[in-house]
Image (cartoon, helix red, strand yellow):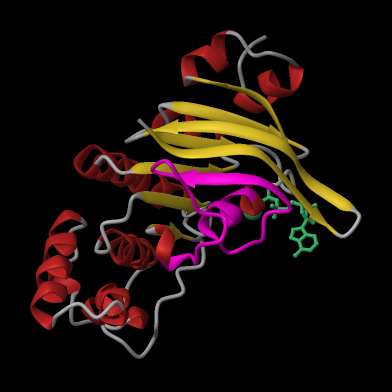
Amino acid sequence: MASVELHNIHKAYGALTVIHDISLSIEDGEFIALVGPSGCGKSTLLRMIAGLEEITDGDVSIGGQVVNSMTPRERNIAMVFQSYALYPHMTVAENMGFNLKLSGETKQTIEQRVNEAARMLDLTKLLDRKPAQLSGGQRQRVAMGRAIVRNPAVFLFDEPLSNLDAKLRVQMRSEIKALHQKVQTTSIYVTHDQIEAMTLADRIVVLNQGKIEQQGTPIELYRKPANLFVAGFIGSPA
Ligand code: ADP
Ligand code: MG
């Protein structure tokens, strides 16, 4: 079953069209990497799926239902950004449970889900710390924890690792992969790092100037890039 569907999506800021007629169908549990150069429209597309940006034309469906007029909360989506945006005055546990509290979950449910997510992300010993007492990688894990406690239908990642150093990026990449294997949540992962895309994704969608240049498995794109742009971007020898 399709989990997320984009039907003829357009986006314009005034006279400037930044997304041109994008259609895409993402299967339940699939991990999609959305790649392309800076300014090609990756974040705009993600924000429209999340409901943080108005769609100029077209429909977004989640679980078979058109969600254009739903709020971000109603869409049951969790988004992880590069800036962790943790609340500095709250502990790790409070940060992770905050959205559940807003949704009116009981204290017991919140504690149970936070503990479960903390175990998955190796945060159990850090639950009482404040964000300032954490490393960059730990903060990123808390941001992911905050997303998974809500048990969302879809994860949206917008270059979540771009603030981390190279070594930590490699480590976090494996953690994201392991997490996806555990929870199997449909994921759309924006990155301009082709290695990240190649190692994480079931399917890569290459975006250029607001249009899809090509989509396929990492191997397909590497072996048969449709054009020089894709070849250059994926780093294949063609
Ligand atoms: P990416 O995430 O791929 O780097 P973005 O989606 O952020 O690209 O931006 C796509 C295009 O839309 C860029 O040309 C950018 O300048 C433009 N853009 C993004 N947000 C706005 C905005 N709020 N107002 C006007 N133009 C915008
Ligand atoms: Mg962006």
Residue 27 lies left or right of residue 175; in this view the side is: right
Image spot of residue 237 (x, y percent): 63, 11
Q: Which residues are magenta?
A: 45-73
Looking at the rendered structure, the number of numbered marks drawn on it comes to: 0
Image spot of residue 16 (x, y percent): 87, 52
Q: What residue lies at 30% left-to-right and 44% top-to-bottom?
A: 185
Q: Nearer the viewer, residue 27 or 195?
A: 27
Q: Quadrant of residue 199?
A: top left
Residue 117 lies left or right of residue 56; in this view the side is: left
Q: Residue furthest bottom?
A: 89
Image spot of residue 212 (x, y percent): 68, 30
As drawn, 27 above or below 96: above
As drawn, 63 above or below 70: above
Q: What residue lies at 39% left-to-right and 52% top-to-bottom?
A: 168
Is 1 magenta? The answer is no
Q: Quadrant of the N terminus?
A: top left
Q: Quadrant of residue 3?
A: top left
As drawn, 202 above or below 37: above
Q: Quadrant of residue 36?
A: top right
